[in-house]
């Protein structure tokens, strides 16, 4: 049975492709995991990936990925997928195809080819208009091949969710263990926004029962204000809380912020002229 609480990416026993009932997508999302090795170049303290390890994506078997994607989409479109997995009637629609896995997808050497593969499979099944989302920490946007993939992703109608949990060096180190300076994250964000539509995605939570510090909130808002003042094209900001428990050692120290806190911060961002969506 598919449910919105179980996001097990191995559900169907496939290597790269998984279906998930997503609150984010408000329906069925077809996920593509380019990191079946659970490897990421970051270690976010709220990361939900089981057995997360440092590293990049392994070599991708593109023929297998194409077969898995095509067969799953055909099963959903023409087979008994919804009945077999007891999907509630209101959720029986493919809302998006998402490159979202157990690590940073743009670390895959085949990232560009995967983008084209998704485009051609979707087109062959009449899904050209299906929303496409790439969920990335944006840390590799400086690489020419990643830029090439993002440009193509944008041409195919895809959008990028760019992770930005802090606008300070200390915050990036504490939250994401990113080994990345905030100036570099900002530069990557600006580069990405010029290549395809970008939503900033920001995870907010209590750590040791404390909300994000005032200087962190201020730095974040100042960054957004600067980007909007310089007309960097941003679609908006997605604020989200701890939907599922962290699998990192810091997990016991993390808890969800009250919705009122998230809404209040969202309003601070809206005052800058940006659209904001909040999900707990
Ligand atoms: S970027 Fe994503 S996959 Fe990587 S550690 Fe952070 S939350 Fe986990």
Image (spheres, grey):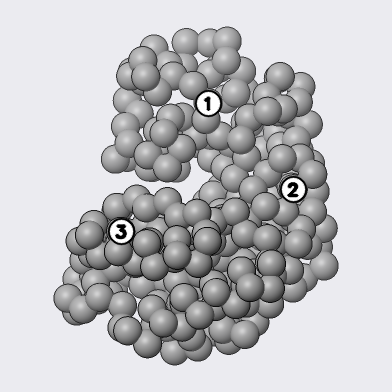
Residue 197, disc: none
Under circle 3, the secondary element is helix
Which class describes the residues within 10 Å of circle 2: few (<14), some (14-19), or many (20+)?
Answer: many
Spatial separation of the CA atoms under disc 3 and disc 1: 29 Å
| Mark 2 residue element | helix
In the image, what residue occupies the spot 31% across and 83% down?
Answer: 213
Q: Residue 11 occupies which quadrant of the picture?
A: top left
Residue 154's label in the rendered image is 2
Q: Relative to 32, does residue 278 appear above or below in the rendering?
A: below
The percent coordinates of residue 31 (x first, y second) are 53, 40
Residue at numbered disc 3: 263
Q: Nearer the viewer, residue 59 or 175?
A: 175
Marker count (numbered): 3
Residues packed near mark 1 inside 10 Å, few (<14), some (14 to 19) or many (20 plus): many
Comparing marks 2 and 1, which lies closer to the viewer?
Answer: 2
Q: Nearer the viewer, residue 238 or 96?
A: 238
Point 30% across, 59% down: residue: 263
Residue on which disc 1 sits: 94
Image quadrant where residue 198 sits: bottom right
Report, in whole angstroms, how far the alpha carbon at label 2 lies from the one at label 3.
30 Å
Foreground disc of the pair 3, 1: 3
The verdict on label 3 being within 8 Å of ligand 1 is no
Category of crowding for the residue at label 3, using alpha-carbon neighbours closer than 10 angstroms: few (below 14), some (14–19), many (at least 20): some
* Residue 185, image x, y percentages: 61, 77
């Amino acid at each position: 049975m598919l449910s919105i609480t179980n996001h097990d990416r191995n559900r169907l026993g496939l290597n790269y492709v998984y279906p998930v009932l997503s609150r984010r997508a408000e329906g069925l999302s077809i996920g593509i995991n380019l990191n079946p090795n659970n490897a990421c170049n970051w270690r976010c303290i709220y990361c939900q990936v089981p057995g997360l390890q440092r590293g990049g994506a392994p070599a991708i078997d593109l023929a297998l990925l194409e077969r898995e994607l095509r067969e799953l989409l055909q099963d959903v479109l023409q087979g008994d997928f919804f009945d077999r997995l007891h999907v509630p009637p209101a959720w029986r629609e493919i809302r998006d195809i998402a490159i979202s896995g157990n690590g940073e997808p743009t670390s895959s050497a085949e990232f560009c080819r995967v983008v084209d593969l998704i485009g051609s499979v979707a087109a062959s099944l009449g899904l050209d208009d299906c929303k496409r989302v790439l969920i990335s920490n944006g840390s590799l946007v400086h690489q020419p091949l990643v830029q090439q993939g993002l440009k193509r992703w944008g041409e195919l109608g895809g959008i990028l969710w760019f992770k930005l949990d802090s606008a300070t060096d200390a915050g990036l180190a504490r939250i994401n263990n990113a080994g990345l300076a905030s100036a570099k994250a900002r530069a990557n964000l600006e580069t990405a926004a010029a290549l395809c539509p970008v939503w900033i995605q920001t995870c907010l939570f209590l750590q040791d029962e404390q909300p994000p510090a005032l200087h962190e909130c201020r730095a974040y808002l100042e960054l957004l204000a600067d980007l909007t003042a310089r007309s960097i094209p941003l679609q908006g900001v997605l604020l989200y809380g701890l939907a599922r428990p962290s699998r990192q050692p810091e997990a016991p120290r993390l808890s969800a912020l009250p919705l009122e806190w998230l809404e209040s911060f969202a309003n601070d961002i809206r005052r800058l002229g940006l659209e904001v969506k909040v999900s707990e």
